[in-house]
Amino acid sequence: MLTAPRPTTAWPVGAPPAQWSLSGVRAVLPDRVVDDARLVVRDGVVEEVGERPPGFRADLDGGGALLLPGLVDVHTDVLAHEHRPRPGAELPLDLAVRTATDRLAAGGVLTAFHGVAFGERTPVGLTAPEPGPGPVLSALRDPVAGAGGARVLHRVDIRCPAGLEDLEAALDAAVGDVPPLVSHEDHTPGIGQYADPATMERFLVAREGMSPTDARAHVAAWRAEREERSDVAAAALDRLGAWARAGRVRLAGHDPETRADVEALAARGGTVAEFPTTLEAALAAREHGLHVVAGGPNAVRGSSHAANVSARELVAHGLVDALASDYVPSSLLTAVEVLVRERLTDLPGAVALVTSGPARAAGLTDRGALVPGARADVVLVRRAGRWPTIVAALRA
């Protein structure tokens, strides 16, 4: 029986030895929970995990905490908030990446796909803020950011020709172990997330300070302009499909609404249905073998802020493979608590939705589960009142 040797010398904080061990934890494995578990790590990889053998002495004692794989987030917009926390107030991009990484880690997220927008306008039709995608990509591809688990979700507006051209240039410069993750988006009022244009109007009033009259006029004009670009959207989807079928990108469809939307996504080589807005779309995605990503905030709240289908309903139907934090970094860990509390799934099932599920959706096979050979990104969790909290995050 393997027993990890006791260290003979201390090691610096943040620089663990090549081999270390942990016990005194409840480990959530893919198929069960081990109440008295031990974990042995060698060279950043899980070597053993399971029941603690009698007499085993570990380097670290978890004090009864819950042991989870590091969470994986396939869609987070936290970087934009860290870069521009207030209108007119910007922080350096490299600092924003650092603070976004820390904020995500505080919620247990150790691998995060940061949304980088390719398009001249925001989803609600306002001029996209500077900097453009180039500087943001550079900041995310810095080795320091990579060591913190930063990856890129390329979000392209299919009705913006310049956005697609910028995306292709970014793909030409991309390097990595898996094809870049690309999500195609169409936020035209009247479809998808904004199937009810009034949802966009309310956003403009609340977040942009527009009057209701101005917001209504803006949305009507934006919708008319977008509808005139249907040929641009068709050409963009053809191009993205060619890239997906050639293996150049891993393609996600954002906010599919109908069965036809999903069937078209599958036909063009898409593998991920990101935030389906209806039960119909989620059912079709499951039938076509697509990875279904739902919103963590939606799961926590019990409903969509845009009056779309409830993530809890989709989980109850077994139609969700992954949750994404979207605009609330802490929502993933909290969603685990809520889904188990509401008896919509068991603990291993809920944990899979924020670990192995999103990892597979993004094409990552080296993380997301406490199994031998996996990357040893792990987090320790305790309950603080009604809610779970991260007490330690250990990166491979």
Image (spheres, rainbow, N blue to C red):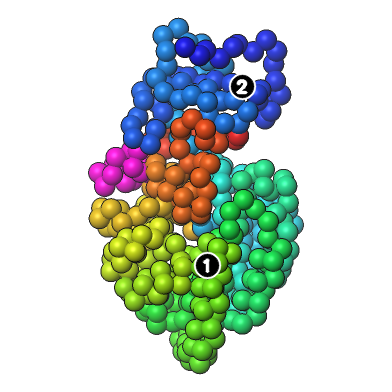
Spot occupied by residue 347 in the image (x, y as percentages of width and height): 33, 38
Q: How many marks?
A: 2
At label 2, the amino acid type is Gln
Does residue 308 appear left or right of residue 75 in this picture?
left
Does residue 52 appear left or right of residue 157 in this picture?
left
Instruction: Please give the range of residues in magenta.
Output: 336-350
Spot occupied by residue 220 in the image (x, y as percentages of width and height): 46, 89
To which residue does mark 2 refer?
19
Using a 10 Å C-alpha cutoff, classify the residue at mark 1 as few (fewer than 14 neighbours), some (14 to 19) or many (20 or more): many
Q: Nearer the viewer, mark 1 or mark 2?
A: 1
Taking depth in this image into account, of 21 and 78 the one nearest to the observer is: 21
User: Of the residues under marks 1 and 2, which one precedes in the sequence?
Assistant: 2
User: Which disc, if any, is residue 295?
Assistant: none
Q: Find the distance from the CA under tag 1 to the CA under tag 2.
A: 40 Å
To which residue does mark 1 refer?
244
At label 1, the amino acid type is Ala
Q: Magenta stretch: residue 41 in it?
A: no
